[in-house]
Amino acid sequence: MLAILLLLGVVVGIAAWWLLQQGLMSKPWLEEAPADEISGRAGAGESPALPAAKVGLWVFLVVAGSLLALFVSAYQMRMNMGDDWRPLPKPTLLWLNTGVLVLGSIALHRAQTAARQGSLDEMRSSLLAGGGCAVAFLVGQLLAWRQLAAAGYALDTNPADAFFYVITAVHGVHVLGGLVALGRTVVTTRRRSLEPERVRLSIELCAIYWHFVLLVWLVLFGLLLLT
């Protein structure tokens, strides 16, 4: 239970820190500014400091983090309920899949940096590299499933086996959803009428999401290894 509370505390703490960095907790009605400056901002149509898409993403990540905490709690509770819990062997392929996911997160970080610097070629190549890593990770997970199934570890063989398949499947769905968003971002960068601000925001959201997906997998993988 303590581990669950710590995990939730970390998720909430990261979200609160990020919101403070974006100025969400500021009080603009208490800030003094010349009237002409205020009217100039309104006339220029300056975008808000905190886009709605970014707020929506962070709300989703907090919800997903809470779901992760529930999975971890259920996993630990069921593991301690009886003697029928027999942990399945962890395929070596899972280590390779973890490395691929790390490389994908690094590629998205490079794409975000390239977008800020205006390097379109590096940005596109990094996005494609990140997408390739995501596909490789999903294929690797399916191969790990096949290895376990061939060895006699099926979904209904043991509670530990069932939890492994469910946890990895839920995480795979999140990776697949991120891959769809990444594909849309790649299509956006191919358009002639390229809006730099929109592209940078889209890539930043993808990078944040992939860093979160990597963090979730490291937590889940560590849980599977330790138990």
Image: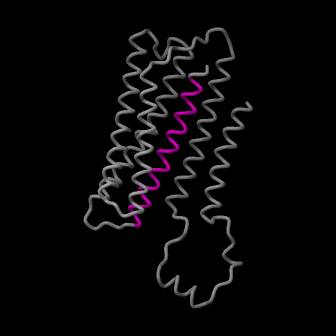
Type of colouring: one colour
Where residue 220 appears, as percent x and y from the top left, is 56, 30
Which is nearer the eye, 125 or 83? 125
Q: Is residue 120 above or below residue 45?
A: above
Q: Is residue 111 left or right of residue 38?
A: left
Magenta span of residues = 197-224
Principal SS element in the magenta part? helix
Which is nearer the eye, 21 or 176? 21
Residue at 37% of width from left, 46% of height from top? 180
Q: Is residue 8 above or below residue 27?
A: above
Query: The C terminus lies in which quarter of the figure?
Result: top right
Residue at 50% of width from left, 40% of height from top? 213
Which residue, as the protein is rendered here, is positioned at the far bottom? 36
Residue at 57% of width from left, 91% of height from top? 36
Q: Is residue 151 above or below residue 53?
A: above
Where residue 192 appears, as percent x and y from the top left, is 25, 65
Tell me, yes or no, whether the highlighted magenta stretch contains residue 205: yes
Where residue 102 appears, as percent x and y from the top left, is 45, 38
Q: Is residue 56 above or below residue 36?
A: above
